[in-house]
Image (cartoon, rainbow, N blue to C red):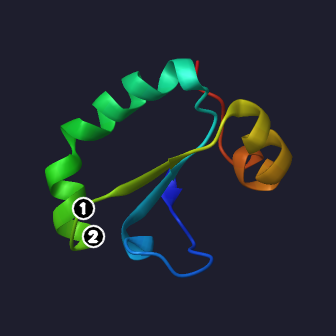
Amino acid sequence: MRWAQPVGDYDGRDRTLQVFNADPGDQRRIREEIDVFRDELERSAGGPLVIIFHSVRQSAERYRELVRAFPKPI
């Protein structure tokens, strides 16, 4: 997960989190984990979060170098 590097102009682009390797079956659990810290994240970001999920396939294809830079969880 990282703060997005926005492309284009949309409301919330400065408050967008990108979540990688998150297939549809995993997204609810991940969102629940984010919700634990949501108040703190939204205070830091200055407003409501926008969350963009990228599937495992999309992460590997479009964000290969970024995803490789982080170790896989055990």
13 to 22, vertically: above or below? below
Identify the mark at residue 48; answer none if there is no mark.
Answer: 1
Q: For residue 28, what is the image quadrant? A: top left
Question: Height in image: 39 above or below 42?
Answer: above
Query: Gap between marks 2 and 1, in whole Å?
Result: 8 Å
Give the percent coordinates (x, y) of residue 9: 53, 82
Q: Amino acid at mark 1?
A: Pro
Q: Amino acid at mark 2?
A: Ala
* Helix, strand or loop at mark 2: helix
Against 66, is 70 above or below? Answer: above
Q: Dot 1, how many residues are within 10 Å of its Cα: few (below 14), some (14-19), or many (20+)? A: some
Q: Residue at x 76, y 44 (%)?
A: 68
Q: Is residue 61 left or right of residue 50?
A: right
Q: Residues within 10 Å of mark 2 (few under 14, many from 20)?
A: some
Q: How many marks?
A: 2
Q: Is residue 26 above or below residue 5?
A: above
Residue 11 locus on image (x, y percent): 39, 75
| Quarter the C terminus occupies | top right
Residue in the picture at 51% in, 22% down: 26
Image quadrant assignment for residue 54: top right
- Identify the residue under disc 2: 45
Q: Nearer the viewer, residue 74 or 16?
A: 16
Q: Residue at x 85, y 45 (%)?
A: 61
Is residue 58 shown left or right of residue 45? right
| Residue 7 located left or right of residue 4 | right
